[in-house]
Amino acid sequence: MFAKKGYHEATMKDVADRLRVSEGTIYLYFKSKRELFKAIGDLGERQTAEVISSAIQSEDPVRRFFDLAADLYEQYEPISGLIFELFAEASRDASLRKIIRGDFDKDRETMRAFLVELQKRDRIESDIDVNSVAMAIVTLFYGYAISRLLGVGKDEAKRTYREAMRLMLVGSEANR
């Protein structure tokens, strides 16, 4: 519903109608639209953590991460416009900005932990600043969403995303 109507215009009644439940039922679980939005963000964080966990457990964690992350980010394509709307709204609303920043920080920490694990396995250089690279990787998601919103083809956006990731994660291997 947020993707269809936008965060500001969507109401809890709209969400209830879409789910075919009463508005009161929605309020049993979520006190406000912000709380519902935060729960949706938490789901995204769990999905990101699952991608990284699966990648870490694989034989080739970098390749597995490329494949899984590209697929996960593709799932977010239908809401790319909502992402922009939320950023605009967050620029005026401190409580929404806090939620979005919290989601960003959690994703960045999850990615940082993944990069530390790659360093331990000698898959990326030990001198790479994992905090900066983690932030760059998380912000790539927003770049992917922007490119799709602006009409860049899915294959081109995905290829660009993968190449940027490859450069950041394995580009230094040529120097070994």
Image (cartoon, helix red, strand yellow):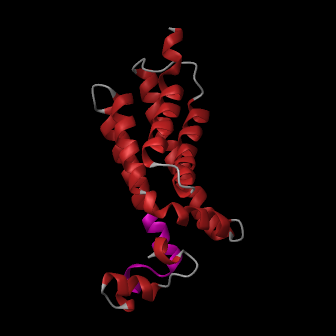
Residue at 59% x, 66% y is 86
Residue at 57% x, 33% y is 133
As drawn, is 64 to the left or to the right of 111? left
Location of residue 13 by image quarter: bottom left
Return the residue found at the far right.
92
Q: Between residues 54 and 163, which one lies in front from this camera angle?
A: 163
Q: Between residues 168 and 81, which one lies in front from this camera angle?
A: 81
Asked if the stretch drawn in magenta spans residue 39, the answer is yes
Asked if the stretch drawn in magenta spans residue 87, the answer is no
Q: What quarter of the picture does the N terminus occupy? A: bottom left
**Is the residue 107 above or below the residue 174 in the image?**
below
Residue 108: % across, % down = 53, 44
**Is the residue 69 above or below the residue 151 in the image?**
above
Image label count: 0
Mostly what secondary structure, the magenta segment?
A: helix
Residue at 55% x, 50% y is 147
**Is the residue 18 above or below the residue 145 in the image?**
below
Location of residue 121 by image quarter: top left
Residue 50: % across, % down = 34, 46
As drawn, is 14 to the left or to the right of 171? left
Residue at 43% x, 85% y is 14
Span of residues in magenta: 26-40
